[in-house]
Image (tube, helix red, strand yellow):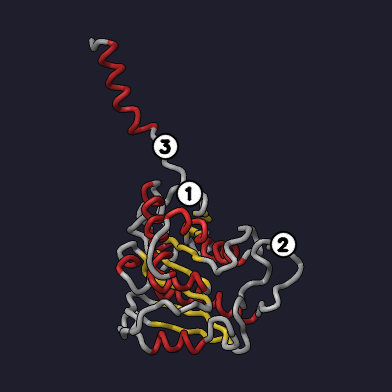
Amino acid sequence: MRRPSLLVSALLVAAPVFAQQATPLPADLHIIAVADDGKPRPWAIFFPRAMGIGRLAPGNQYADLAAFLNQRGIDVLVVDDDAALKRLGPSGSAGEKRAAVAVDALAKLRAAGRFDMRCPGLVVGWSRGGEGALTLASSASGTDSGIRAAIVYYPSVGGQPSPWPQRMPVLALQGDADGIAPAKKLDALAADRVQNPEYPFTIKLYPGAKHRFDVAHPTDDPASARPEKDFDAKAHADALAAIDAFLNERAIAGASCALD
């Protein structure tokens, strides 16, 4: 019969393996999951425009797109990038800083058993956040992290290299009346990229649509009855249809990660 002291010692050594809790995620990382069941799924990272994420509730542009992706079996991480950048203090261009935030976030999520590397990843960026998405789409930090495609809404492209070294498929959603992130700058980036037929760069240009054409309500007041002045219902619906087709083409949906 084992001595009680030896048995207690053995239990103390073994206990942390079973009782250790995952480290809580930083407050600037917000997960909107299909279900809280721990199953591996495709995943997406969102980088917002300069106004920030606001209140993540129905009517908020990020919460609504997250719900749209959830319906397709994709878990979503929405990054409060101003807070994350302050927390981490990365160096480099706007895009490089956000890429560093993504890499750090994925490391933390994977330590918690989320966003499985074997499942395809997606990065989505709006305006300034598009800089981060484009950097991840053109660098090893993106592909090595499991990101397989990028979607950008009216992206800022000022900090991207020329020629742009594309490393994954990109879908760009752009209004031709955008005076903040003009379509001509996006066109120039796409035209002067390192061409690879395996990686299309698709631009959906919406006539008359302005910057923030997908923003139906203020991000911090998603239940507001007052529509945002630049919201374009047709362009927004067309953009969602384009995203759906893009995801189907790239096979990024719940069925594409049936690891269990």
Give the number of the disc on residue 21. Answer: 3
* Camera-nearest label, 1 or 2: 1
Report, in whole angstroms, how far the alpha carbon at label 1 lies from the one at label 3. 15 Å
Pick the residue in front: 157 or 202: 157
Pick the residue in front: 140 or 206: 140
Residue 246 location in percent, x, y? 45, 76
User: Which residue is most to the left?
Assistant: 1
Residue 73 location in percent, x, y? 48, 61
Is 166 left or right of 216, judged from the image as shown? left
84 shown above or below 11: below
Q: Residues within 10 Å of mark 1 (few under 14, many from 20)?
A: few
44 shown above or below 6: below
| Label 2 sits on residue | 223
For the residues bearing labels 1 and 3, Cβ distance under 8 angstroms: no
Q: Residues within 10 Å of mark 2 (few under 14, many from 20)?
A: some
Residue 20, picture quadrant: top left
User: Which residue is most to the right?
Assistant: 225
